Amino acid sequence: MLIDVHVHTSISPCSVLDMDTILEVSRQRGMDGVCLTDHDTMDAAGVVREGVQDDGFVVLVGMEYTTPQGDFLIFGPFEDIERGMDARDMLPFVREADGVAIGAHPYRGWRPAQQALFKQGLCSVIEGVNGRNTVSENLSAQVLAQKHGLPMSGGSDAHRTDELSKFPTRFMDRIESREDLIRALRLGRCEPAWLNQPVRKTSTTG
């Protein structure tokens, strides 16, 4: 399955993507599903039916959580999670709640997930390909994952239509729910899926 696990709706103030556009374009571009990961909120769950849609397309909701040590994509029962926690507190909380956290865009010049958190075993999945990273930043993230033997995801980090679906994650198992997604990420049953698209350099915040 191909799922873009890092997409921002217009609920995030930095994104212009409405829900209908995300779902329509993602389907058109061959995705099997999409994860909506707005900044510090899961409000998208109130405006879309989560789970398997009538045509088999899968919609899941997480969030991009901001900490002083960088940003993390978190998935699980976190609609009411306390905002602004230190990553050293947030990451154990996510694990104990049977969720999962992905270290977002390591090595980026702004809000990268700090490398020490992977070395210390606090974060166990790395975003190895991010659509808003430079080539060098993505390569460094991949080396970091390989060094610590951690699974990698890919994500478009889409805020505009042209960014959607370019860097999804390939899952080896059928994903139909948050629980399926969490299990696959924890077990490393996933990998970044390169779709013969160049990684673009950009100066836009993500």
Image (cartoon, rainbow, N blue to C red):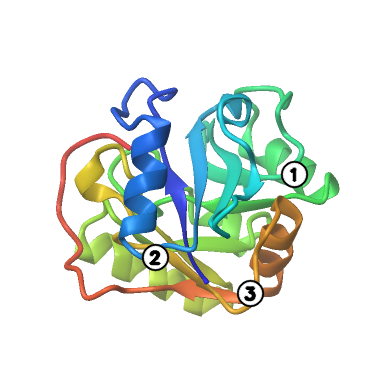
Q: Which residue is mark 2?
A: 141
For marks 3 and 1, give the CA distance. 17 Å
Residue 74 falls in image quadrant: top right
In the rendered structure, the answer to whether residue 199 lies left or right of residue 21 reads left
Could you tell me which residue is drawn at 63 percent across and 22 percent down? Answer: 83
Q: Earlier in the sequence, mark 3 or mark 1?
A: 1
Nearer to us in this view, 31 or 118: 31
Quadrant that contains the C terminus: top left
For marks 1 and 2, give the CA distance. 22 Å
- The answer to whether marks 3 and 2 mark residues whose Cβ atoms lie closer than 8 Å is no
Task: Between label 1 and label 2, give the one nearer the viewer.
Answer: 1
Nearer to us in this view, 147 or 95: 95
Q: Label 3: how many residues lie within 10 Å, few (<14), some (14-19) or many (20+)? A: some
Q: Which residue is mark 3?
A: 188
Q: Is residue 123 above or below residue 158?
A: below
Q: Secondary structure at mark 3?
A: loop
Q: Earlier in the sequence, mark 3 or mark 2?
A: 2
Could you tell me which residue is drawn at 70 percent across and 58 percent down? Answer: 182
Q: Which residue is mark 1?
A: 94
Could you tell me which residue is drawn at 28 percent across and 27 percent down? Answer: 16
Q: Is residue 188 above or below residue 13?
A: below
Q: Is residue 171 above or below residue 181?
A: below
Q: Earlier in the sequence, mark 1 or mark 2?
A: 1
Q: Where does the image place residue 32, in percent across and percent down from the top left?
A: 49, 63
Three-letter code for the amino acid on which mark 1 is drawn: Val
Residue 73 falls in image quadrant: top right
For marks 3 and 2, give the CA distance. 16 Å
**Would residue 71 be seen by someone viewing this image from the given angle?**
no
Q: Secondary structure at mark 1?
A: helix
* Residue 32, disc: none
Q: Residue furthest front?
A: 54
In the rendered structure, the answer to whether residue 128 lies left or right of residue 54 reads left
